[in-house]
Image (spheres, helix red, strand yellow):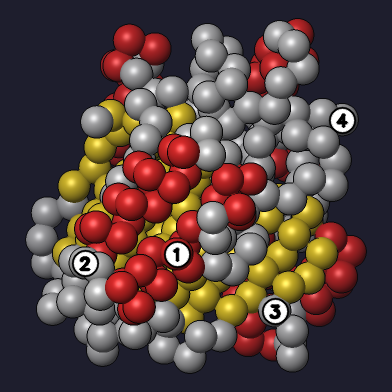
Amino acid sequence: MKPVIVIHGGAGALTRQAMSPEKELRYLAALQDIICQGQRLLTAGASALDVVTEAVTMLEDCPLFNAGRGAVFTHQGTHELDASIMDGRTLEAGSVVGVQRIRHPIQAARKVMEHSAHIMFTAAGAEALAREQGLEMVEPDYFSTDERYQQLLAAQQGAGKVLLDHDAPLDPERKFGTVGAVALDAEGNLAAATSTGGMTNKQVGRVGDSPILGAGCYASNRTVAVSCTGTGETFMRTLAAYDVAAMMEYGGLSLEKAADRVVMEKITSLGGSGGLIAVDGQGNIALPFNSEGMYRGYGYADDKPVVAIYR
Ligand code: ASP
């Protein structure tokens, strides 16, 4: 069993042809930096919980990904961010929904987990808790980038569709974002974290799978830590993250088989698109996706980081 971190930066219609070499390098470098930081922390003995918090905080700060700065726009040109975190050791969890002023929604989810008697807070309540806990607050336009705004305009001009964020205007129906991290630490503990801006041109108030424990995020030391990305509605209807754990626990499936069945059969049969990252208590990992690509990577402690975008 070796400590390991796995991250994703969203899935979608990511093809080599649609991406400039320069942009591809930027994505790969960002993923690699974050994995290296996770590996350093794991080697120094950090907990899985701290490692996924740090990785997702870094992903939120990177405008290339649809979480924190660089989040997609709602139909009304605003941002509504969702995040969740779960500790596989205790099954404690925290989540925030529709927040607009918290610089790092994942840190707010962690504060909910550690400093409230509850698990999930929406907009104003989540922001009040974050403020009380001393988290950094920002103006709502802090999250805006020109690239995402162009995506909103493109989505609104093409049939008013709701898009996943990494699909270029080329194919507005297949565009996702979201970031996530899962980790196994030296003590054998698992943790998962997920953060998102949601889907481009989503209706105000729409909530996807990312902040829903068991759908977009789940961790239990008994089985697995999972973070999902894709058409949130199908991940909610299949309880995708928990379903991986349930198939392992009750059906005795391996991590690889359980993760594959969820993404390639269950999500696919409902017309959903996307993928997930997962790690089990032995340090086995799985990164299945049914879209053209998924920004992803992993690194075992003291080993070379591995990053990829396409199949
Ligand atoms: N799953 C996210 C949502 O539905 C979107 C994504 O993964 O890009 O909000």
Element carrying mark 2: loop
Residue at left 35%, top 42%?
264
Element carrying mark 1: helix
Q: Three-letter amino acid code at disc 4?
A: Gln
Which callout, 3 or 4, points to the residue nearer the camera?
3
According to the picture, the residue beneath numbered tag 2 turns out to be 254
Residue 243 badge: 1
**Quarter in which the N terminus is drawn:** bottom left
Answer whether labels 2 and 3 touch (C-beta < 8 Å). no
Residue 240 screen position, x and y as percent: 49, 57
Disc 2 residue lies near ligand 1 with CB under 8 A: no
Q: Earlier in the sequence, mark 2 or mark 4?
A: 4
- State whether residue 104 appears in this view: no
Which callout, 1 or 4, points to the residue nearer the camera?
1
Label 1 and label 4: CA atoms lie apart by 34 Å
Q: With 113 as the anchor, is 271 left or right in this view? A: left
Q: Earlier in the sequence, mark 2 or mark 3?
A: 3
Residue at left 41%, top 88%?
89
According to the picture, the residue beneath numbered tag 3 turns out to be 119
According to the picture, the residue beneath numbered tag 4 turns out to be 76
